[in-house]
Amino acid sequence: MKGTLQVSDTLAALAAQSTGVTVADYGIEETFAVIDQDNRIYNDEVRNELLPDFCVTSGEREWVYGGNDEMTVEEIDQYGDPDTEKVGAGATMGAPLKRFGRAVQWTWDYMQVTPVAEIAKQYTALQTADLKGIRRNIRNAFFVPTNNLTYRDRLLDNRTIKTYSLLNGDGMAIPMGPTGTLSDAATRTHYMGTASLVAADVRALIRKALDFEVQGELVLYIPGTQETAIRAMNTPGDFSALVDVDIVQPNTATYVRGDLDLRNPNDRRIGKFGAAWVDVRPWMPDNYLLVVDKGTGDMKPLQFRTRPNGAFADFGLRARVQSHPLYGDTWARDYGIAVRNRHMAAALYIGNATYTAPVL
Amino acid sequence: MATITKGAGNGTLTTKCPPSNCRVGGGYAATDIPASTPCYFGTDGRINISSGAAANAAAAVDGWTLEDVKAGEFTTLYTDCNLGYGKGNDVAPGTSYYLGTAGVLSDIATTGGTRVIARGVPDNNITGAKEHKLRVRQSY
């Protein structure tokens, strides 16, 4: 909801009496010190738990991507010398840098009557908005199949940056597979579609990642709406389920080692499909499946780009303005998310044989 | 004429710390007045809801309320700032709005509301439903 925090917005005002310590009593500086401390913990969680799943975090804005090209050898006799060959160079790709934020403002009277807990709620909502924004940008990077070759780095120096989607048949050189196979860059796409999901579609999706050297954990992400369909694909070699370890299974049962989380049905690992773990996640758009090689070190599917020295990479206070009776904060984070290794993920749309990006 | 529907909730001021000059002045409300409503100063100093029903004194817009007020309560009017118009409003970005009847906005000029008093400003949030705002001004 848009607007300014004013006395009519406080729960205490509506209830006609205040409960708890007000910001004025506790102290405005002390209140914001508590908020800052909480915000440090929040940023640590984002940095250490959310981002490492998919992203390399660094100030690097451009890097070279692409694989080895092929050369050949020929037989040579004592008088001969072979002709020369050369391999094609990799391509430069990059990540944008943007700022996402929100302002909060309040009247002087609001601070006099509002409990500290109420203020804390406003800033918790700010953090949640930041988190949702990061997740949305991650989804954008994975699911939007178009390149942006003219992004202008306006927050830095206006340099033109080329950002790319996952492999989309645009001709950029592709890394060699583990058996030395080179894919056709003009036709290989990691955006697939099917009008009716069957196990063969899921196998083909996972195969997109297996065609390359898998660097880390391979995971198939699905929305909750597809859990039943995936579970039904239980032919040997396809889906095998995690079970509740408290329930004794029959000797003839086939299941995956581990414990099924019964308390978070919308956000949990449910088993394996071939080489990939299967995770149900609430951030997955309906009608889409996503396979990701989560990678390791510098080999990850996405880049979380920060400023070169990491400045403003955490969500935090950017400006505090006082113009009595109004006081306002701006909270923001500078970052950009883009695909770093184009072959390390693939998406499947199950609403049509032609892939269409979701509305995010 | 399309009347612009205000959305749910108390939208109010969305410009952060506007300059003091945006603060027009205050007075006692002559009637109950919702937030984000165009108002005029009566000759008795009280604040009334503007109306474009006729080309008369009531068609002036001296400023806009920032909160709901009851009759007899003091309120301060602001101008030249952005106001929220509630969740689920049908404000369209880049659209001009005129004074309609009794504080309501119209997308075409009316008998008393012949000048643009608000423009739709886009909400650029990336994660939630769009809640477009109004850029408001005076008219007299």
Image (cartoon, coloured by chain):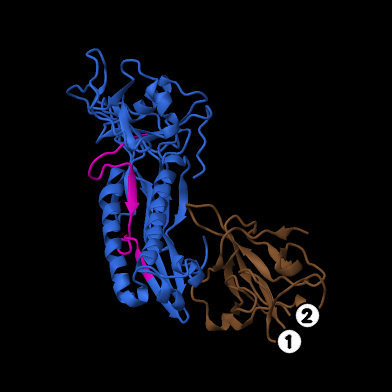
Chain colours: A blue, B brown
- In-front residue for pair A168/A326: A326
Say which element carries label 1: loop
Report the residue that reaches farthest toward the left.
A78
**Which of the 4 quarters of the picture holds residue B32?**
bottom right
**Which of the 4 quarters of the picture holds residue A300?**
top left
Say which element carries label 2: helix
Q: Is residue A156 visible?
A: no
Residue at 72% over, 70% down: B116
User: Residue A184 in the image: x percent, y percent?
Assistant: 40, 29
Label 2 packing within 10 angstroms: few (<14), some (14-19), many (20+): some
Residue at image mark 2: B57
**Quick check: A18 left or right of B71?**
left
Residue at image mark 1: B43
Find the distance from the CA under tag 2 to the CA under tag 1.
10 Å
Task: Tell me the kind of residue under disc 1.
Answer: Thr
Tell me which chain the residue with mark 1 is part of: B
Instruction: Say if the magenta span includes residue A238.
Output: no
Contact check, label 2 and label 1, Cβ < 8 Å: yes
**Quick check: A134 left or right of A355?**
left
Label 1 packing within 10 angstroms: few (<14), some (14-19), many (20+): few
Residue at 39% over, 46% down: A138
Residues rendered magenta in the picture = A291-318
**Which of the 4 quarters of the picture holds residue A226?**
top left
Task: Tell me the kind of residue under disc 2.
Answer: Ala
User: Residue B24 in the image: x percent, y percent?
Assistant: 61, 82
